[in-house]
Image: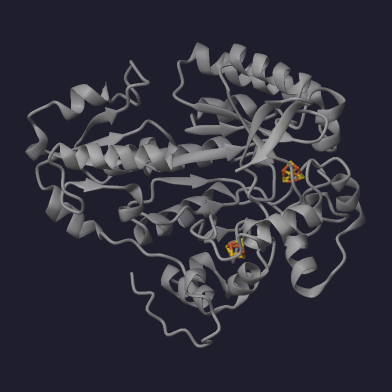
């Protein structure tokens, strides 16, 4: 893929440009030949890669992950010792797909120590596919969360859904332009379960060997069963506390519907033995990190969800305008700010201290909106990249236009790209549970 378009403005930051893949499909075929590919770590990226590689005709021998005993997606899972002690290394290719930085480094070192050679028979998914695209299948939301741009007055106006026919065309183009595309997120600003085509959309992705991740507020259950039965790889269900605190954070949503949704997903997964990873992204506010958090852990354990605590925060589009042009933060977001663990200015100071660091979400490109336009940033509702729709121009053209834009440079120069650093850990302190920003 050629993205060597000259940068026209010397003030653009070099780290505001997209990274491209180092190994092309045909080169990879040449390296793999008759060898069998193994993938270290059963996670969304690993499962997606296995699916996509098999779709492209490669031989995938299984996963390497000591946490799992049973087969995943019809593939065997080997423990690390069994895999690395095998004498079959010359006939194998290993892709280390683990996300954890320390674990990834250790795994690569162990692989090299066992005879694997980086770039010859040892890869990471980023060598093959540096992009994490999003296809927004629903542009409208049924909630009005106060921290989110969709909670602003009139946010749904003029927005709609992507049809299954358009989705198919978009994914066909995307997989031809990014052959190792292993997973795609199906959400940005709307609620995917309000799209009546959702089950068909997931089936289309499954047929093309692309794993899907869907985040849903679980308020609407009309298409819930068919959605779960279509078997997306990952379902994420954000939560903001129990009962009234849930309903405050997920404004317009009801705790009852959320809980019923969790239970139904879990029931269907068990009954049909579905291979779906289930996550609750738990948004931490000042007052939901003690008994509410314990309660959600209990519910999650019973229903087979993993809980990931993250900091609740204002979405960065309005913060960008505030930091770059001094625009006021909308009143409704100021209201929500009262319940945040760290207020806007505190979090901005925290982010600005990291302004020279890279942007974690930049490679989430392209983000294709419900109407086919391409968003510059997956976390902001504007700007769009150029004036053409994704189906009307090659991906290279969108990459070139976005890399010439000063938007990311402006964002990074005021540190807004690190404002949404929401990873935390909870720690027991003298005065109760404390939030440590990571
Ligand atoms: S956070 Fe999600 S559920 Fe809430 S308004 Fe925004 S898009 Fe809708
Ligand atoms: S957060 Fe900022 S730097 Fe990162 S992709 Fe979005 S606009 Fe660019």
Q: Is residue 17 left or right of residue 108?
A: right
Q: Residue at x 45, y 67 (%)?
A: 18
Q: Residue at x 63, y 49 (%)?
A: 421
Rendered image quadrant of residue 287: top right
Q: Is residue 337 above or below residue 42?
A: below
Q: Foreground: 404 or 206?
A: 404
Rendered image quadrant of residue 432: top right
Question: Which quadrant is the N terminus positioned in?
Answer: bottom left
Q: Foreground: 424 or 381?
A: 424
Residue lying at the far front of the rendered structure: 430
Q: Is residue 260 visible?
A: no
Q: Residue at x 37, y 35 (%)?
A: 47
Q: Is residue 20 above or below residue 231?
A: below
Q: Estimate the x, y position of residue 99 in percent, counting from the top left.
A: 42, 41
Q: Is residue 313 left or right of residue 385?
A: right
Q: Foreground: 407 or 274?
A: 407
Here the colouring is: one colour
Q: Residue at x 64, y 27 (%)?
A: 224
Q: Estimate the x, y position of residue 422 in percent, counting from the top left.
A: 65, 45
Question: Which quadrant is the C terminus positioned in?
Answer: top right
Ligand 1: give its quadrant: top right
Q: Estimate the x, y position of residue 424 in percent, counting from the top left.
A: 63, 38
Q: Estimate the x, y position of residue 151 in percent, counting from the top left.
A: 82, 49
Q: Foreground: 228 or 275?
A: 275
Q: Is residue 204 left or right of residue 323?
A: left
Q: Is residue 72 visible?
A: yes
């Amino acid at each position: 893929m050629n993205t060597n378009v000259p940068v026209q403005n010397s003030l653009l930051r070099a780290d505001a440009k997209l990274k491209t893949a180092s190994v092309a499909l045909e080169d990879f075929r040449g390296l793999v030949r008759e060898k069998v590919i193994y993938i270290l770590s059963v996670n969304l990226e690993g499962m997606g890669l296995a699916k996509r590689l098999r779709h492209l005709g490669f031989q995938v021998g299984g996963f390497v992950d000591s946490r799992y005993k049973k087969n995943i997606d019809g593939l065997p899972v080997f423990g690390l010792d069994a895999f690395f002690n095998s004498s079959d290394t010359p006939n194998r290719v290993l892709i280390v797909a683990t996300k954890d930085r320390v674990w990834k480094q250790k795994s690569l070192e162990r692989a090299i120590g066992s005879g694997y050679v980086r770039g010859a028979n040892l890869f990471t998914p980023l060598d093959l596919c540096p992009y994490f695209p999003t296809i927004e299948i629903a542009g409208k939301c049924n909630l009005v969360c106060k921290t989110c741009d969709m909670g602003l007055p009139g946010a749904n106006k003029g927005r709609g859904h992507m049809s299954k026919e358009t989705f198919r065309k978009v994914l066909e183009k995307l997989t031809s332009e990014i052959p190792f595309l292993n997973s795609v997120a199906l959400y940005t600003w709307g609620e995917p379960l309000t799209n009546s085509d959702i089950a068909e959309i997931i089936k289309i992705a499954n047929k093309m060997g692309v794993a899907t991740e869907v985040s849903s507020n679980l308020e609407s259950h009309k298409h819930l069963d068919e959605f779960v039965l279509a078997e997306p790889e990952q379902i994420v269900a954000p939560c903001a506390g129990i009962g009234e605190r849930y309903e405050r954070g997920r404004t317009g949503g009801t705790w009852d519907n959320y809980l019923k949704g969790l239970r139904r997903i879990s029931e269907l997964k068990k009954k049909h033995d579905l291979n779906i990873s289930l996550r609750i992204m738990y948004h931490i506010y000042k007052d939901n990190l003690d008994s509410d958090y314990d309660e959600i852990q209990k519910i999650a354990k019973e229903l087979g969800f993993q809980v990931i605590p993250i900091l609740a925060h204002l979405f960065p589009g309005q913060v960008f305008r505030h930091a770059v042009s001094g625009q006021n933060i909308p009143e409704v977001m100021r209201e929500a700010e009262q319940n945040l663990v760290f207020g806007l200015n505190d979090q901005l100071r925290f982010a600005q201290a990291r302004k020279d660091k890279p942007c974690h979400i930049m490679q989430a490109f392209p983000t294709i909106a419900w109407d086919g336009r391409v968003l510059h940033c997956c976390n902001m509702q504007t700007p769009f990249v150029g004036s053409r729709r994704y189906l009307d121009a090659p991906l290279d053209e969108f990459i070139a236009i976005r890399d010439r834009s000063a938007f990311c440079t402006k964002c990074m120069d005021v540190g807004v790209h690190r404002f949404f650093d929401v990873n935390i850990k909870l720690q027991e302190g003298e005065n109760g549970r404390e939030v440590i920003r990571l």
